[in-house]
Image: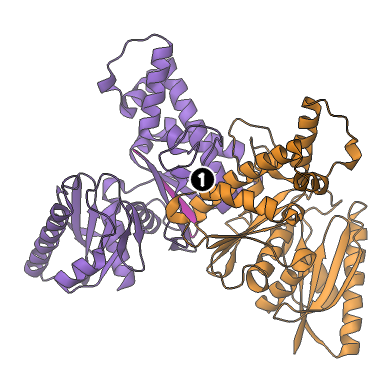
Chain colours: A purple, B orange
């Protein structure tokens, strides 16, 4: 059976794995990406990762066919390169990922945006199995996404589709660093939820230690029926639901799959978001619509990278 | 050469035509649709229209292959029927258009939403020629649209994609009759623009005759550098641009084609919308993006109906 290498580059870690065309991961390893240091460090770690996997493949008599790479930022899928700069990845600007890795390892290389990788993985072997048209959204430090149409990833004219976090829900709202105003990310990402909670604590003159406030803590307090935490969650879910209702009215998917750290809050979060979407979206777009939690967790990125490689070679 | 019948059902008129697979219209006629009266009247007019076209086809020795029908409302393309009620079309509820017309004329029938028809026509033989991924938006009494992905109309899971008018741009804004809050249609449709202008006239204590206020008049006054009219247009274009920036960040199309009565205002309108979209949307989604006026005008609906019939038979 043929095998594929998947790399999932992050700001902190580089995950790397060997898998098959069914997205099954057979070997999985992690090392620091050193992405805040330099391009050379990032490449050094990627090279070392691939070398390690090729060694293992040789021992196990795996036939490695190609390499899939997930990276943050805008990725030109056709040409296998980074478009422009990527926040938090030093020197990771206009990097010709495919060219560099193909030259070194003489294997075909496919690369795409990390959220798109997760979308592919969830659609094929995760929560989206069986749906032809779905939208994946990840809610964490940022809000990203991927759109699957007719079973295939839809990338857009310049590889920038599915930027759900940068759709505006309040046209004269908060200014986002992307240049737009009132972006969903300003109201429903993990940092936005933490900020909102602290603002509410300040308003109520509640003392708190800034360093311990996290979305996990807020969700914990919601479970304990804390009023301020519950208000915070309600407002964030209202914003997220409004943004997703727009997605439903535009794309009319069969399913929305929600991943990322915030989605780990579970049913208290998902139930609220679902209610807002069903209140807001057009009734005709709702029959059969599923809004569900992602299934693959932290492995989704490498599974997607392996599937991307397998699908294209 | 084969020929196709296209019907374009509207609240006031029924347009009907004979054309070929290139979307060329050879015969074009119009009669009242009597859509505000009853289902029977609407069907009577549709039957009479098809009979008339078949007569002409016989005289001209045209070989009529199939019928395409554009209708307002939600249309189940697969089953060729109306989904639910349609505002302003009396009795036009859950009508099995295909079944009714096929039974009577023994010709294959294809039917879709009128905005989708226009999107097909503009994409294939209008302003969108040459683009593979585009979004069509019509701005008139309502705001509707159609999405073309990889050269094909994207209809969504329950035939309700591209409801751009019902995406919210102000999550706590004006309540829309659709159930959502802050819908684009509440800020940038022709009635919304007229309403905004009258509100501004009232605020400034300007006397006016309500009956003569129209978007045409407002655009005329913008040309004459009228301050209140210009403010009105600026605000409407800001709203429309914010809504379209969301479309760009989600779908990343090559082109946005704007049709409908309001788009007839010309460059003063289009230029403003373009500026807002380019200010708001993600820079990475903008290279090459074209925002252009629809080309086919009032004929687009029947051209789309003819192309729909030709493409499917």
The image shows residue A310 at horizontal and vertical percentages of 29, 68
Instruction: Give residue A123's position: percent from left, percent from top.
Output: 40, 56
Residues rendered magenta in the picture: A132-141
Q: Position of residue B218 (x, y in %)?
A: 79, 44
For image coordinates 92% across by 71% down, the residue present is B48
Q: Residue at x 25, y 22 (%)?
A: A211
**The furthest residue to the front:** B225
* Residue matched to label 1: B280
Image point 61% across, 44% down: which residue? B167
Relative to A24, A295 lies left or right: right
Q: Is residue A234 left or right of residue A260?
A: right
In the image, residue A138 lies in the stretch drawn in magenta: yes
Looking at the rendered structure, the secondary structure element under dot 1 is helix
Q: Is B62 left, or right, of A128 in this rendering?
A: right
* Residue B106 seen by the camera: yes
Q: Quadrant of the N terminus of chain B?
A: bottom right
Image vertical order of residue B141 relative to residue B29, above or below: above
Quadrant of the image occupied by residue A100: bottom left
């Amino acid at each position: 059976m043929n095998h594929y290498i998947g790399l999932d580059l992050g700001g902190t870690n580089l995950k790397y794995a060997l898998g098959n065309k069914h997205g099954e991961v057979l070997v999985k390893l992690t090392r620091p990406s050193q992405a805040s240091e330099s391009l050379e460090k990032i490449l050094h770690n990627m090279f070392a990762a691939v070398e390690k996997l090729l060694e293992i493949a040789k021992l196990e008599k795996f036939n490695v066919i190609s390499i899939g790479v997930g990276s943050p930022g805008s990725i030109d899928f056709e040409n296998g390169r980074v478009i422009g700069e990527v926040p938090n990845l030093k020197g990771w600007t206009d990097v010709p990922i495919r060219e560099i890795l193909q030259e070194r390892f003489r294997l075909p290389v496919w690369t795409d945006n990390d959220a798109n990788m997760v979308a592919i993985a969830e659609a094929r072997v995760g929560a989206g199995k069986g749906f032809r048209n779905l939208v994946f959204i990840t809610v964490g430090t940022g809000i990203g996404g991927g759109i699957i149409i007719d079973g295939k990833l839809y990338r857009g004219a310049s590889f920038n589709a599915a930027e759900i976090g940068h759709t505006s829900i309040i046209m004269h709202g908060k200014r986002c660093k992307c240049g737009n105003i009132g972006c969903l990310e300003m109201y429903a990402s993990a940092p936005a939820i933490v900020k909102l909670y602290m603002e509410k604590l300040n308003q109520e003159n509640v003392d708190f230690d800034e360093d311990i406030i996290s979305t996990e803590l807020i969700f914990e307090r919601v479970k304990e029926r804390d009023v301020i935490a519950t208000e915070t969650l309600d407002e964030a879910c209202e914003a997220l639901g409004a943004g997703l209702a727009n997605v439903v009215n535009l794309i009319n998917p069969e399913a929305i799959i929600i991943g990322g750290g915030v989605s780990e809050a579970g049913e208290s979060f998902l139930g609220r978001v679902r209610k807002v979407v069903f209140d807001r979206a057009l009734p005709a777009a709702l029959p059969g619509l599923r809004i569900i939690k992602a299934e693959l967790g932290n492995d989704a990125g490498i599974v997607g990278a392996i599937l991307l490689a397998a699908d294209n070679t």
